[in-house]
Amino acid sequence: MMTRMLVLMAALVAPILGHAVESGSQIAWTTETLKLVKKGNVEKGKSLAESCKSCHGEFGQGMSSEVVDDETIPAIPALAGQVANYTFKQLRDYFNGDRSNDSMTSIAKGLTEQDAADLAAWYAWLPAPKQKVGNNEKLAIAEKMVREGDGKRILPPCFVCHGANGQGEKMDIPSLAGQHADYFERTLLAYKNDQRHNDIYSRMRLIAKQLKDDEIKALARYYQNMQ
Ligand code: HEC
Ligand code: HEC
C-alpha cells in the first residue's frame, strides 16, 4: 500500500521536475533482506569494524573536515546509532555502484551481504554520537523547515520522515541527530545536483532540489546540535 503510494507520488512529481525518476538503488526491502539485516551479528560486526576505525573513529563517531585536515579526504560521517537498514543499504549501494565514493566503493566491494548486515548491526548498537558545537547561531529557518516544511514549495517537514528527534525511522530512513554538519551539507548538495542518486523513489533528491544552499547549511548545523 505504502509502496504503491510512493510509486504514484514519484510518477506524479517526476514530470513536474522535468526528469525521469529512476529507482536509484537495487535494494528491495523483501522479507528475506529485512530478515538478514535484523539478524545481523553485533560481535562479528564489531570485529569487521576494526578496518573502519581509521576513518569512522573508534566508536563510529566519524570526523569533521577540520579534524581530517586533508583536502583529498572529505568529512567522514558518523555511523554510530544509525538505523541498521540504512547502513546496510548504503554498503550495498556502494557495492552495486549505485552510490560512489573514492574510499567507500572499494571498501564495500570487499564486503559480502552478510558482512554488511553484521556491520549494520554493530553500528546500530553503538550509542549515537554527540557532536554539540556551540548553539548560538540563528537556526530559525532550519527549525521551520524541520517542524513545518514549506507548503508553497510542496516541501514536507523533515520530521515526518526523519523523526521528531532526528532518530530516523523504520525501513531505510537514516538518523540525522549528531551527524557532522560538513558531511550533512556535502551529501545534501550531492542529492541536489544528482551526484548522489541512490535514494529510492528520489525521496531526498526531490526535497534537496528545492532547498537553497543557505537553508542546507542551517539544517546541517541544526541536526548536528540535536541530541
Ligand atoms: C579511508 C577512509 C574510510 C574507511 C577506511 C571507511 N570509510 Fe566509510 N566512509 C568514508 C567516507 C569519506 C564516507 C562518505 C562518502 C560519501 O560521501 O559518499 C564514508 C561513508 C560511509 C557510509 C555511508 C554513511 C551515510 O551516512 O550515508 C557507510 C555506511 C560507511 N562509510 C561504512 C563503512 C564501513 C562499514 C567501513 C569498514 C568496513 C568503512 N566505512 C571504512 C571513509 C571511509
Ligand atoms: C519523504 C521522506 C523524507 C523527508 C520528508 C525527508 N527525508 Fe531526508 N532522507 C529520506 C530517505 C529515505 C533517505 C535515505 C535515502 C538513501 O538511501 O540514500 C534520506 C536521507 C537524508 C540525508 C542523508 C543522510 C546520510 O547519512 O547520508 C540527509 C542529510 C537528509 N535526508 C536530510 C533531510 C532534511 C534536512 C529534510 C527536510 C528538509 C529531509 N531529509 C526530509 C527521506 C526523507
Image (cartoon, helix red, strand yellow):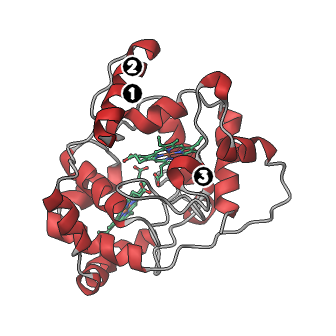
For the residue labelled by badge 2, is the local secondary structure a helix, a strand or a loop? helix
User: Where on the image, by quarter, is ligand 1?
Assistant: bottom left
The mark nearer the N terminus, 3 or 1, is 1
Q: Quadrant of residue 133?
A: bottom right
Q: Work out how far the residue at label 3 is from the one at label 1, CA to CA, in angstroms.
A: 31 Å
Q: Ligand 2 within 8 A of label 1's CB?
A: no
91 up-or-down from 155: above or below: below
Of residue 107 and residue 116, the one placed in the foreground of this image is 116
Mark 3 or mark 2, which has the lower sequence index?
Answer: 2
Q: Using residue 179 as the reference point, say whether residue 18 is left or right of it.
A: left
Residue 149 rendering spot, x and y as whole percentages:
65, 37
- What crowding class fits label 2: few (fewer than 14 Cα within 10 Å), some (14-19), or many (20 or more)? few
User: On the picture, is 177 further left or further right than 123?
Assistant: right
**Which amino acid, mark 2?**
Leu
Which type of secondary structure does the marked residue at label 3 adopt? helix
Residue type marked 3:
Asp
Give the number of the mark in front: 3 or 1: 1
Q: Are marks 1 and 2 in contact (CB under 8 Å)?
A: yes
Q: Which mark is residue 120?
A: none
Q: CA distance from mark 1 to mark 2?
A: 5 Å
Whole-percent x and y of residue 48? Answer: 26, 78
Which residue: 84% across, 48% down?
138
| Quadrant in which the C terminus appears | bottom right
Q: Residue furthest front?
A: 1
Where residue 68 sits, quadrant-wise, is bottom right
Q: Is residue 86 visible?
A: yes
* Residue 123 image offset from top left, x and y in percent: 39, 74
Residue at the disc numbered 1: 9
- Distance of label 3 from label 2 (alpha carbons): 33 Å
Residue linked to disc 3: 182
CB at mark 2 closer than 8 A to ligand 2? no
Which residue position holds label 2?
12
